[in-house]
Amino acid sequence: MSSSTRTVAANASPNSIMTRVFVVVLIGLVILFVAFLVILSTSSHSGQQFSADGFERRKFSYFEILGYRLTATEYFNNTGNLENDLVKQKWITSSGKAKKTDWVTVSHTMHGHTYVSDANILVSYLDMSQPNSVINLARWSRANPGYASLMWSEIQKMAEGNMYLLVPDIIHHMVSLSQQDDNPIKQPTLKEDESGYDEPISDMSNEAKAEATRKQEEIGKASLNPFLIELYLKAGKAAQDAQEDARARFCFEQVLRLSPDSAEAKSALDQLPPAPEKDEAETPEPAAEVSSEEETNL
């Protein structure tokens, strides 16, 4: 070793060496921390689920890396006022005990992308509850209790049969029906600069309200049943052509519910393979319980 090298080595203090080691370790830790944040941000999963039972909604979130869960699935109730009111009015049914199999994924965000299912169609309409919405279904339902009781019960059946694609058809049919001159309850209009207004039935007596509701139900059934029969037949044939047997079977069964003597629906059902046997009912899943379901199933 040369004299100059020995001099440099001799002059290198322990504090200087420790400082260099500390800097290297610190840089390494920063790199690891940044890498961890990047991985964590890309492993975040979140979304929304919907149950036809009572139109309950809930948000979910969890972290997953390379197919391995880092956290349990957390659920947060997201059911809106409109859904609660539909149950309160008994226009839809609710057991309050939704099972795992009752929940369908509406939206799922992962890796920076959001995927949505057909259930998002109904959820989007349920969210139209602002005064100036194109179709304010919350207010429309209160203004048309007879039409609403028919429409929402049928929409719930559609949701149970995973036929969310038909929801816009029935909603727009019933809204159009309510705009006809024979509506027993006069429908006020909303001005552009008006944020709210009285309900059209707010000044009606209980007797008058009950009679108007009865008349709406009578008019609604006469219009809705033929419309639904044609709608379900068309949707059933489309599902049958696409080899979606479960959807096709559901549609044809609904036709027979509305028209038991429909030879066309009976013939179509006979052409479908037998329905698979249903599994035994699962126990209800509490909202806070860890779920083993796969949220990516849209």
Image (cartoon, rainbow, N blue to C red):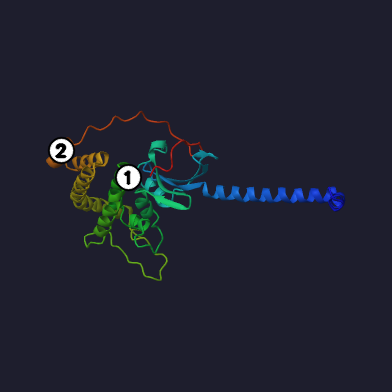
Farthest bottom residue in view:
193
| Local crowd size for mark 1, using a 10 Å CA cut-off: few (<14), some (14–19), many (≥20) | many
Residue 202 occupies which quadrant of the picture?
bottom left
Q: Is residue 210 in view?
A: no
Q: Identify the amino acid type marked 1.
A: Ala
Q: Is residue 244 above or below residue 224?
A: above
Count of marks overlaid on the render: 2
Q: Is residue 239 above or below residue 216?
A: above
Tell me what residue is drawn at x 40 percent, y 57 percent. Answer: 129
Secondary element at tag 1: helix
Distance CA(mark 1)–CA(mark 2): 23 Å
Q: Identify the amino acid type marked 2.
A: Lys
Is 235 on the left-hand or right-hand side of 281? left
Rendered location of residue 262, percent (x, y): 14, 41
| Local crowd size for mark 2, using a 10 Å CA cut-off: few (<14), some (14–19), many (≥20) | some
Farthest front residue in view:
2
Q: Quadrant of the C terminus?
A: top left
Secondary element at tag 2: helix
According to the image, label 2 marks what residue? Answer: 266
Comes first in the chain, label 1 or label 2: 1
Toward the viewer: 189 or 199?
189
Rendered location of residue 131, percent (x, y): 40, 62
Rendered location of residue 14, percent (x, y): 84, 47
Rendered location of residue 246, percent (x, y): 27, 39
Q: Is residue 19 in view?
A: yes
Toward the viewer: 26 or 298?
26
Tell me what residue is drawn at x 83 percent, y 49 percent. Answer: 15
Is 218 on the left-hand or right-hand side of 116? left
Toward the viewer: 200 or 43?
43
Tell me what residue is drawn at x 21 percent, y 42 percent. Answer: 240
According to the image, label 1 marks what residue? Answer: 159
